[in-house]
Image (cartoon, helix red, strand yellow):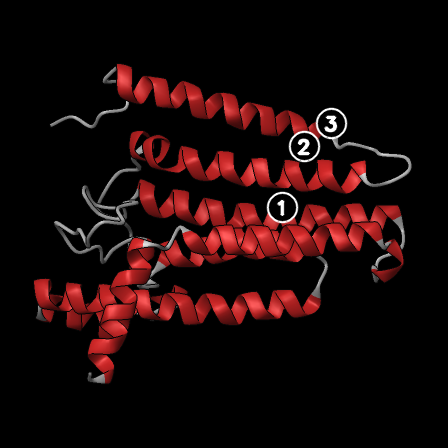
Amino acid sequence: MALTEQMQGQGTWLFKHRGVLPLIIFVIGAGLFLKNESNPENWILKEELQHYLYELSCLIISFLGFFIRVYTVGYSRPNTSGRNTKQQVADELNTSGIYSIVRNPLYVGNFFMWLGIAMLTGNFWFIIAFILFYFLYYERIIFTEEEFLKNKFGDTYLNWAKKTPIIIPRFSSFVKSEYSFNWKKVLRQEKNGFAALMIIFCLFDIAGELIKEQPNINVILQSFGIFSVLTYFVLKFIKYKTELLQDPV
């Protein structure tokens, strides 16, 4: 089998199962996090305030990724930048807005979302391994997606790809999006990511504190976690029981 065919086959399989990566990160990361919390002497940051600020920085990095996704989805063309896993879908080619500075902004957003969670472990080698694994993992997916887009849009795609970086943004080439921000699309698609992100941080916080002699649960964080879950179920109800989040035909 030719290398290109092999990469495309791997990419297709990974595209359909790309939800597995978060589970792998979560399971391994949770184990390392609990190990470090059980042995606080292993932490480089000894002071409680330093530990708190570090975890806050992890949350900020994850939310940076989430807001990249929100911006991307909100300004994307209809029937693009979706969460489909069964097959590639693209009715049109996104070339303006954030897509004018980077070809794969959703994967950039995903990277930062999960980087913040990987950093929570406090394990330097796990963080490095995550970064390497992430890029190897998505390299195949990106290859498959770009083959699909090249075959569907031809020269239009090739001309855009020549001037637009794959993963590291070139901010000087920014072109304003031709679409208005679509809050309905964001609420439909990104409610899952927001809830999942908050739940993971809350679970890490609770687990880390319960193994200490004097647990100090972060009430503010847990409140946001509860809010995210309630928001998820409210939006899910609105999505399936009403037409409030539907785009006009």
Distance Cα–Cα, label 2 vs label 3? 5 Å
The residue located at (70%, 45%) in the rendering is 56
- Amino acid type, mark 2: Leu
Residue 162 image position (x, y, % from top left): 23, 75
- Which residue in the structure is indicated by mark 2? 221
- Sequence order check, earlier mark of 3 and 1: 1
The residue located at (19%, 52%) in the rendering is 87
Q: Secondary structure at mark 3?
A: helix
Q: Which mark is residue 59?
A: 1
Q: Is residue 28 above or below residue 209?
A: below
Residue 88 as seen in the image, left or right of residue 30 = left
- Amino acid type, mark 3: Val
Q: Quadrant of residue 224?
A: top right
| Other-residue count near label 2 (Cα within 10 Å), few / some / many at <14 / 14–19 / ≥20 | some
Viewer-proximal residue among 215 and 112: 215
- Amino acid type, mark 1: Leu
- Which residue in the structure is indicated by mark 3? 219
Distance Cα–Cα, label 1 vs label 2? 10 Å
Q: Which residue is situated farthest in the top direction here?
A: 242
Distance Cα–Cα, label 3 vs label 1? 15 Å
The residue located at (58%, 51%) in the rendering is 27
| Other-residue count near label 3 (Cα within 10 Å), few / some / many at <14 / 14–19 / ≥20 | few
Q: Secondary structure at mark 1?
A: helix
The residue located at (78%, 32%) in the rendering is 217
